[in-house]
Amino acid sequence: MKRFEFIQPSSVEEALAAWEPGAAWLGGGTNLLDLMKIGAMQPDRVIDITRLPGLSGIETLSDGSIRIGALVRNSDLAVNATVARDLPMVAEALLSGASGQLRNAATVGGNLMQHTRCNYFQDPHAACNRREPGAGCDAREAGDRMALLGWSDGCIATNPSDFCVPLAALDAVIEVRGPQGAREIHVSEFHLLPGDNPQRVTALEPGELILALRLPPEATAFAGHARYLKVRDRTSFAFAMSSAAAALKMEDGRISDARLALGAVAAKPWRAAEAEAMLSGAAPEEALFTRAADAALAEAKPSGDNAWKIDLARRTAVRALLMAAAGTPARIPALPASPFGSKVGDLAHA
Amino acid sequence: MSPSISLTINGEARAVALDDPRVTLLDLLRERLDLPGTKKGCDRGQCGACTVLVDGRRVNSCLTLAATLDGAEITTIEGLALGEELHPVQAAFIENDAFQCGYCTPGQIMSAVGLISEGSAGDDPERIREGMSGNICRCAAYHGITIAVQEATRNMIRTDKEDAA
């Protein structure tokens, strides 16, 4: 690991003042430290933000929004009573990610900032435009499970986060502060598609720091029919090959509002607005879900030897919608977000 | 900068001068504090061999910079037994053949202790397997590990009840 200067500010102001080009914020360290060990990230200065006050709370605001501090750990967020009750697919996504040890360390802010798990990004000896602009992309030759949507010739990496998929579906907002002051960024606009500049992966400006995440009051209206489904090589402790967050608002047996976002198919969690529009007002049935999933993947095209993944993503979306229609289970299944983890008939949330 | 940190390790207060901020908790324990019970496997958070408790929560010590831990309470496998009396999880691992080569065992045991205190798995074998998925065992002693964690969970709940009564 390259040497770095270690700084431990005790306030947000001090942290912002300590930032300089080449610096990195350190939260739980589960992604940054790993990338530093293998040489994919080489910050000159590491700013430990874990002791900043006021960033570890989970609160319900007067308008019904749920505000989550950037330093809340994944494991604490997943078992928080409000989150488990009102945002069950957020809890399920969190519990389907990583391992118990990693969830105890990983933070909300760090999860939003999580880098792609593309092998070629992680290997400093491989060509990667995301790591080194203009270097080329070795994944184009060898990647077989890369992006289907929104990729460019320069980069076909996917965003690996589970957490961000339901956040995108539920219109979460990120509160940031930086040298130019405070601002808010919608989760769906936070991760950038690669285009001609794959190195720029988020909308954060240099020196900006994530302070909190906010779920709008409408997000809680889906609690009775909200699921996250994640298909992976093994049932636990693996990144998604494809995933989907599906949420339905049901009124008199019909869908009055729908949310659908897909994971592991693009450089950002992929909100499927067209599919949502098709679902709204209709009766929940498999044929409708299939048409909606077709619409969600209509623009998908293979970025390498991964045409198989289009089918997988489509089926994942259909299955997630079926699971959501069946109702949120009273308790998160033993195998969270797994196609093997839910028996229909096991419901009773709401 | 050479941060100095104060830690409590297995109940003992330790002051540590760090000459390099790159030192992980894992390397601090093994290389500098003579506590080699915590094992280094992948060194990337993927195998769980380095699991310890920080302030009572299980984490991968390989992905934790020692410099971030000023004031923390660390428990390693060396600090689990009460004198000659094994921790219930240690006893259950022996009773149920929950290891073969033993290299992953300290991490498995620390992870199990963390999991049991999290309280979400109970003695449900499926929830235990899911909760222990951050610990890889190349000898594939998973069957015994699952039974050991079930048994330790039951024993610890029973002991808690007796203590309360």
Image: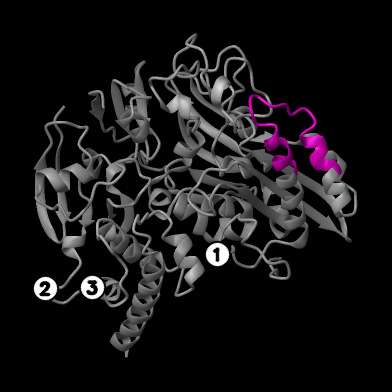
Residue type at numbered disc 1: Ala
Residue A299 forms part of the magenta stretch? yes
Write the residue at 70% across / 40% down.
A313
Q: Using the image, name the chain to which the residue with label 3 belongs.
A: B
Mark 3 surroundings: few (<14), some (14-19) or many (≥20) residues within 10 A: some
Q: With respect to residue B91, does A231 lie above or below?
A: above
Percent from the top left, x then y, of residue B54?
27, 54
Residue type at numbered disc 2: Gly
Q: Decide if residue A203 is in sight here.
A: no
Percent from the top left, x then y, of residue A2?
25, 23
Q: Decide if residue A10 is in sight here.
A: yes
Q: Which residue is mark 1?
A: A334
Query: Label 2, label 1: how many angstroms apart (C-alpha)?
Result: 36 Å
Write the residue at 35% across / 44% down.
B45
Q: What label sits on residue B87 in the rendered view?
A: 3
Q: Which residue is mark 2?
A: B83
Q: Which residues are magenta?
A: A291-314
